[in-house]
Image (cartoon, rainbow, N blue to C red):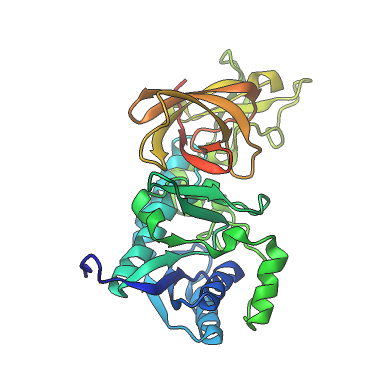
Amino acid sequence: MHTEPGSLNAQRVVVGMSGGVDSAVAAALLLEAGFEVHAVTFLLWQSTEAPEGIAASARAIAEALGIPLLILDLRERFFAEVVTPWMNDYANGLTPNPCVSCNPDLKFAALLEAAEQLEAQWIATGHYARVSRNHEGLMRLQQARNRERDQSYMLYRLSQPQLARLKLPLGDLADKAEVRAHATHWGLPNAHQADSQDLCFLGGGDYRTLLQRIHPNSLLPGPILDQQGNGLGQHTGLPNYTIGQRSGLGLALGVPQYVLELRPQDNALIVGTAEALLRQNCWLENLNFIGGFPPAPQFEAEVRIRYRASRIPASIEMVAPNQARITFTTPQRSVAPGQSVVFYEEDCVLGGGIISLQR
């Protein structure tokens, strides 16, 4: 269904309801602000349990808030668009973060589709970040006021059309205690539910178990080599290791060894000293800029090289329309291909890209 421009209800908002306390409180805050709130819950493929439990939690929350709930089955789409590429990335020697692509390409896209069906002007989620419009009319993505909870890193791939219709009610809250206080005030059944730390499709399981089950060839053993190509031992499958890892290598060489590179072309794990782990620069591909384009062909920014990492100064040079080279002010450890680097200017997200295997 396509809604004609101008026919959307400006007081109606569709909230992505995950079953957790954050999205529940986001819905409650929008109700308090006078919006007509509709909840949407996605059934997503999971490796260890059926998603019906999430649907039951969402129903209980919607009933407590007195709002309608729409349940959409996205399991097949989610497996094809998120889980399969995630497994392929691991098989190709990357350390993927599926959330950064799933958010714009699947979850937020599906939310907007639901909003069109319900003729709602707005969508909302329980993410900790903020959106605003600058003096030129462009949407901005900003960090949450509570920097400890900030999730702007995970949202850097959102587009201007998505941001223009997005509300993030938790972005201005002080801390998680305030979120739980709202949940208690509204009598929500999940007010004291623990935060989930896992990828949503793992359901508390180990990602290696899922890879072994669905992509067993990615876990074949192979050689551990030093930087000169000398054999030092055997690894148990490249996805069992991450850049910067020291423990679990089974090496006794007198000098601590760290994972420097996962080399899928010959199924080799390359190790070396802590000093060899440091990177002054890296290449990025698959770039996205919140404003639609980079600030300049070369620009300075603070960058985050993985979720929850500290921001560090760097210089970003555009070398192609969708490729950049980053030079860090100080060398960085554990720069892992497949992870995202996100650029910040003060509290605003400029954009970001994915670390590539190119050297």
Q: Position of residue 281 (x, y in %)?
A: 54, 21
Q: Nearer the viewer, residue 283 or 208?
A: 283
Please say if 19 is above or below 299: below
Marker count (numbered) = 0
Which corner quadrant holds the N terminus? bottom left
Q: Residue at x 62, y 81 (%)?
A: 188
Q: Nearer the viewer, residue 41 or 1?
A: 1
Residue 338, visible in the rendered structure: yes
Q: Horizontal placement of 172 versus 268: left or right?
A: right
Q: Nearer the viewer, residue 148 or 273?
A: 148
Q: Residue at x 35, y 59 (%)?
A: 109
Q: Position of residue 348 (x, y in %)?
A: 53, 43
Among all residues in the image, which is located at the extreme right? 254
Among all residues in the image, which is located at the extreme front? 135
Where residue 128 sits, quadrant-wise, is bottom right
Q: Position of residue 39 (x, y in %)?
A: 44, 75
Q: Horizontal placement of 215 versus 172: left or right?
A: left
Please say if 228 is above or below 160: above
Among all residues in the image, which is located at the extreme top? 228
Q: Nearer the viewer, residue 291 or 93?
A: 291
Q: Residue at x 39, y 74 (%)?
A: 12
Residue 278, visible in the rendered structure: no
Q: Position of residue 104 (x, y in %)?
A: 40, 53
